[in-house]
Amino acid sequence: MTKKLLLINIFLSQTIILIVALVLKKLLVNDISLQTIFTLNLSLPNFIVLGLGSSALLLLQLLFHKYLPQEKLFDEINSILLEKFPLPVLALIFFGSAIVEELLFRGIVQNILGIWLASLLFSLIHVRYLKKIYILIEVYLMGLILGFSYHLTLSLWIPILSHFTINFVTAFLIKKGYIKMENKMENKIENS
């Protein structure tokens, strides 16, 4: 997959998610304005939730990478993304994705269906993980943490920043070699 094709794929998928969020907001959550959803509240309790939520996400990520077989956590698209783009470009991709996904799943869906179902839908929207049960479980647990951080703060910026932070820190750790992300099946074929 080329860089251009990957960027087009990311742009289109995030645009679709944004359109779905705006349509659902208009149809089902019309009593809450986007301005209210995106209000930035810089209170100490919100910073504490941001720190605890981001730490919990990072701990979850590290535990999965430490205790589960790497081939169960391998995702080809993530591998290509990390291989083809430098950290500053990844930061832009991750920040845009965090805004769009958190608007849909925390700002809209969670207000309609609650934390548990919003987290389930959040994990299912990552369709490429449906055959990768460990990654799917990890994404569901991340959705719960993000959902509870929104519930506790009523500030969408808290899960957005946590979502961005976990994606960026994980990418940084993988690029620097602190977390190994390799496809063991691919290695077996190459070594044959």
Image (cartoon, grey):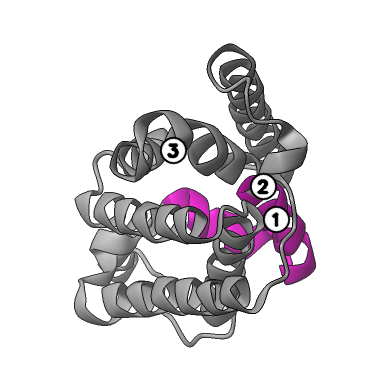
Tell me what residue is drawn at x 24 percent, y 41 percent: 131
SS assignment at label 1: helix
Q: What residue is shown at x 70% (from left), y 35% (from top)?
A: 11
Asked whether the residues under the numbered discs 1 and 2 touch, taking CB atoms below 8 Å apart as contact, a structural biologist would say yes
In the visual, does 54 lie left or right of 60? right
Q: Which mark is in front, 3 or 2? A: 3
Mark 2 packing: few (<14 Cα in 10 Å), some, or many (20+)?
A: many
Alpha-carbon span between mark 1 and mark 3:
20 Å
- Residue highlighted by disc 3: 110
Residues packed near mark 1 inside 10 Å, few (<14), some (14 to 19) or many (20 plus): some
According to the picture, the residue beneath numbered tag 1 turns out to be 95
Residue 78 part of the magenta segment:
yes
Q: Which quadrant is the C terminus positioned in?
A: bottom left
Q: Nearer the viewer, mark 1 or mark 3?
A: 3
**Viewer-proximal residue, 71 or 153?**
153
The residue drawn where x is 64% and y is 16% is 26
Q: CA distance from mark 3 to mark 2?
A: 15 Å
Q: Earlier in the sequence, mark 1 or mark 3?
A: 1
Q: CA distance from mark 1 to mark 2?
A: 6 Å
* Residue hosting label 2: 99
Amino acid at dot 3: Gln
Main SS type for the magenta part? helix
Element on which disc 2 rests: helix
Which is nearer the eye, 58 or 146? 146
In this image, 155 relative to 73: left or right? right
The front one of 6 and 49 is: 49
Q: Identify the magenta region.
A: 76-98
For marks 3 and 2, the one nearer the N-term is 2
Image height of 192 relative to 48, above or below: above
**Quarter placement of the N terminus:** top right
